[in-house]
Image: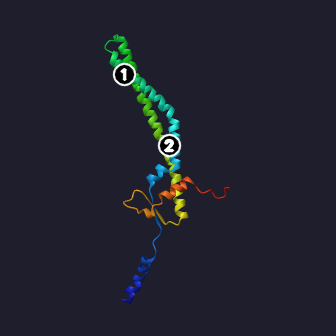
Amino acid sequence: MLLLALALLPACLCAQTPTGKIGYVDLKRLIDNAPQMVESRAKLEREFSPRDAVLKTDENRLASLKQRYDRDGAIMAKADADALKREIDTLDRSIKRTREDLRSELNTRAASERDRIWQNINDTVIEYARAQGFDLIVPSPVVYASPRIDITDAVLEHLRHPAPAAGATP
């Protein structure tokens, strides 16, 4: 009996030691609200807005041409109606190609920016966790996390106001 009690003693002692400090971070909220991501989205919008405006102008022109063809196509000379139809088809193909190219380039650039910023966010979470003495940070999605262990707001604040780098002069 004594031998059994001595054998179970280490297990009992381990069960009584305090558990590590655990935190939870909502990655979707971090990615959506990190100032670096907000700035990146704004930068991409500024960069792509002129091309988007040109595309919208072409779409308006196409709508106008289609309306003209629908309204006047029956009373136009056959050659004029055919020429207008070809112009509509050509412009429609051009718009579709331009839209697809723009979407593809925007998706590629957005993914590149997201990957670049993701590393910074991840490093910030790790830096915050180490500074605050966390043993484990659980990322989303999880079934449940108590607001008591949610450090998302603190990490966002850390992303907004990063600590000065070691050795940097103010």
Residue found at x 53% / y 36%? 47
Where does the image place residue 51, in percent across and percent down from the top left?
Answer: 49, 31
Q: Residue furthest top?
A: 77
* Quarter of the image where one finds residue 3: bottom left
The answer to whether residue 116 shows anywhere in this view is: no
Q: Residue furthest left?
A: 74
Q: How many marks?
A: 2
Residue type, mark 2 in image: Arg
Q: Answer with left or right where residue 151 lies relative to residue 80.
A: right
Res 18 label: none
Where does the image place residue 66, in percent across and percent down from the top left?
Answer: 36, 21
Query: Is 114 or 43 nearer to us in this picture?
Result: 43
Q: Residue furthest bottom?
A: 2
Where does the image place residue 59, in percent across and percent down from the top left?
Answer: 42, 27
Query: Is 147 or 145 nearer to us in this picture?
Result: 147
Where does the image place residue 117, in percent across and percent down from the top left?
Answer: 52, 49
Q: Answer with left or right where residue 86 lies relative to residue 43.
A: left
Circle 1 residue: 66
Residue found at x 39% / y 24%? 63
Query: Is 113 or 28 nearer to us in this picture?
Result: 28
Residue type, mark 1 in image: Lys
- For the C terminus, the quadrant is bottom right
The answer to whether residue 47 shows anywhere in this view is: yes
Residue found at x 41% / y 85%? 6
Circle 2 residue: 41
- Circle 2 SS class: helix
**Nearer-N-terminus badge (1/2):** 2
Mark 1 Cα within 10 Å, few/some/many (few <14, many 20+)? Answer: some
Q: Is residue 126 above or below residue 13?
A: above
